[in-house]
Image: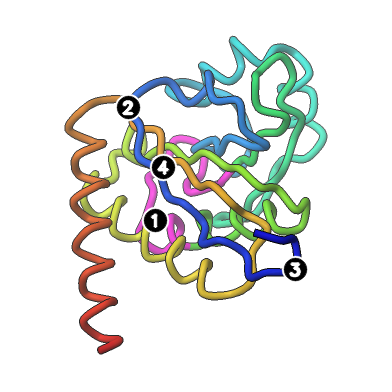
Amino acid sequence: MGHNQTRMATKIHFLQGDITDMAVDAIVNAANTDLLLGSGVAGAIRRKGGAAVERDCERRGPIPLGEAAVTTGGNLKAMYVIHAASMRLGGRTTAESLRLATRNSLWRAEEKAFKTIAFPAIGTGVAGFPMEECARIMLEEVLEHLKSRTSLEHIYFVLYDEAARRTFEETYRRLTSAERQNAS
């Protein structure tokens, strides 16, 4: 295929594993509005990414609830980290904050013309958000985003365990089969 032919559809992948091991343009951190790297994915990013990520967070934070900020990836395999603020420090993720944080993460990726991005199940750790609802909201946002022109070629959902990966895959199948039925 030549360069002037239509762009191939963005591929969505579901993996089980550690998001901090992903060699992508950006990994998404389930962040708080203060951009303090605490536990869960954020703690792993702090440990593996090193001081550069933490310094960048201190410079950029705090950010509004539902916003997303880009920092260096430091020592990570990913070039950048997109910090998706789905909660306030010590707070909980809501459906609305998750939807906005996912949407704004995708827009930060577009602004930087990223081709590859990896998301965790935002808000399902310490923030206590239900996995199935998380999968539905995040996937709805990604599918909606992909209806417009995008620089993204691969979107990964990197889930910590088998049950979460299965939940995301099943939710994706349900959403895309519903879309196909609505289109016909």
For residue 98, side relative to residue 76 (left or right): left
Q: Which of marks 4 and 1 is nearer the N terminus?
A: 4
132 vs 85, left or right, is left
Q: Which residue is drawn at 24% across and 44% down?
A: 131
* Vertical position of residue 36 compared to residue 32: above or below: above
- Which of labels 4 and 1 is toward the front? 1
* Rendered view: 144 above or below 133: below
- How packed mark 3 is, by other alpha carbons closer than 10 Å (few <14, some 14-19, many 20 or more), is few
Q: How far apart are marks 4 and 1 (CA)?
A: 8 Å
Q: Residue at x 69, y 54 (%)?
A: 108
Q: Mark 3 points at which residue?
A: 4
Q: Of tags 2 and 3, which is closer to the observer?
A: 3
Residue at disc 4, secondary structure: loop
Q: Look at mark 2 in the image and give the residue it sits on.
A: 16
Q: For mark 4, what is the residue? A: 122
Region rendered in magenta: 84-99
Compare marks 1 and 3 and give the one earlier in the sequence. Answer: 3
Residue 88 drawn above or below residue 136: above
- Provide the residue designation for mark 1: 138
**As shown in the figure, which amino acid type bears the numbered disc 4?**
Ile
Q: In this view, does 113 lie to the left or right of 116?
A: right
Number of the label disc, if any, that sits on residue 170: none
